[in-house]
Amino acid sequence: MQDNLQFTPTEFISVVNQTLEYSYGSISLVGEVASFKVNQGKWVFFDIKDEESSVSCFMTLYQLRMPLEDGMKVEIRGVPKVTKWGKFSFTVTAIKPVGEGSIKKAYELLKKKLADEGLFDERKKRPLPTDLARIGVISSTNAAGYADFIKIINARWGGIKIQVAHTQVQGLDAPDQIIRALKYFNEKSEVQVIAVLRGGGSADDLSCFNDEKLVREIAASRIPVITGIGHEIDESLADLAADVRASTPSNAAEILTPDKNAIKLNIESMVLRLNNLIFEKIRAEKSEIQEKILRVVREIKNKIEVLDSDVKQKIKIIEALNPEKVLKQGYAILNGKISPGSVVKITTHKKEIKAEIKEIYERK
Amino acid sequence: MKENKTLNQKINELEESTDWFYSDKFNLDDAVTKYKTAISLAKEVQKDLDSLKNEIEVLAEDFSK
C-alpha cells in the first residue's frame, strides 16, 4: 500500500469517487426519508436515515417516479459520491416505497394526482378487439402468472400469434423494462392488444406497478392494454390506467379469448336442438296432413250418407207410388170411357176384368 | 376454388343458418338441404377448433437495457 500520497483536492475527490465506484458500483439503501425538498423544479434532495445514521441523497425530479414525503420508508438505488465541495452524497437512480404504510401512502398520493389529471377516466377506456390474431405479452417468462396465462389461453383458443416481451415484474428495474416493452409493442409490432401480467405477490413485490412513469405509459399506449396483476384483491395504478383490468393473469386469458370447449358444447347442443326441431316440424306437418285426410274422408262419408238417405227416401216415395202396391191394397185401375153402356177394363191385383157401365152417379 | 373462411366467419355462418330453422322462412322443402349444410359446417367448425394452436414467440430484444 502506498502512503503519503499527494493530490490536489480535485484529484483526491476523483480518486475517492473512482474507488467508491470500483468498490460498490450500484448499491441499494433502505431507510426513512427526511428533509425532502425539490429545488428549481428539477433537483430533489432528501436524507435517508435509520436510528443512528443519515445519508444525504440527490436525484433529478425526472427520476422520482413516486410521491415522496418525510417519514416514508423507501428503497433507493444509486451510487455513493463525493461532490466537488467535498460533501458525501448518494446519487439516486431509482426509488420505491417499502413497507405497507409507505407503499399505501405513496399509492394514495399518486392515485389522487393521476386521477385529477384524468388518467383513470372511464370514458378513455377502449374495448378490446374481439377477433384476436396477435397479442403482445409483457411478463417474466419464469413467472407462475405467465405460465398460467399461456396454459389458459392455449386451453381456450388458438390461432393467435403471441409475442412475449420478457421483463422483470418486480424490483426497481421492472418499471423501466416494462416501459421499454410497451414502447416496443407500440412502435415496432402489429399486436392488437398488450397484456401486462404478473402473478400474486406481496405489496412490495407488486409496488413496481404503481410507478408513475409506467402508469403514464400504459395510459398513453396506442394499443389497448389489459392488465392481469396479482390476485383479485390487488389493485395497482397500472390496473386503473389500463383499458381493461383482469383480476389475475388467468382471468386476462379468459377475457381475451372465447372458450373453444364451450363453443364445441354449444354446437353439439345446437345440432341436437336442430334435430329435435326438424323431427318436431316433420311430425307437425305429418299430423296436419293426416288431419286433412281425415277431414276429407269424413266429408266424403257425410256426403255419401246424405245421398244414401236421399236415395232411400226417394225409393220409398217411388215405392209408395207403385200402382202394383196400390192394387195390392185392394184398389183397381179402370181404363176406358166412363159413360153408361161403355165397356171398360178393370185391373185388380190379380185380375183384369172387362165390364160394362150401367149407370153413373155423382159421389155424395 | 374453395373459399378460405376464418373460424369466426364459419361460426357466424353456422349461427345464421341455425336461425333460419327458427324463422318464418322455414319450409320443409328447403330444410333438408339447409340441415345438411348446417351439420357439415358444424363438423368443420369443431374440427377447426380441435386443430387450433397458438404460436408463441419470446422476443429476442433485451428490455433490461
Image (cartoon, coloured by chain):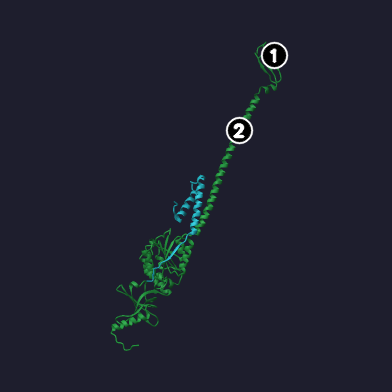
Spatial distance from mark 1 to mark 2, Cα to Cα? 48 Å
Depth order, front residue of A224/A245: A224
Chain A rendering hue: green
Provide the residue designation for mark 2. Answer: A306
Q: Chain of mark 1?
A: A
Depth order, front residue of A266/B9: B9
Kind of residue at disc 1: Ala
Depth order, front residue of A223/A200: A223
Q: Which mark is residue A355?
A: 1
Q: Quadrant of residue A24?
A: bottom left
Q: Which mark is residue B31?
A: none
The spot of residue A104 in percent (x, y) is 41, 72
The spot of residue A186 in percent (x, y) is 37, 64
Residue closest to the far bottom: A4
Mark 1 vs mark 2: same chain? Answer: yes
CA neighbours of label 1 inside 10 A, class few (<14), some (14 to 19), many (20+): some
Q: Earlier in the sequence, mark 1 or mark 2?
A: 2
A303 shown above or below A161: above
Q: Quadrant of the C terminus of chain A?
A: top right
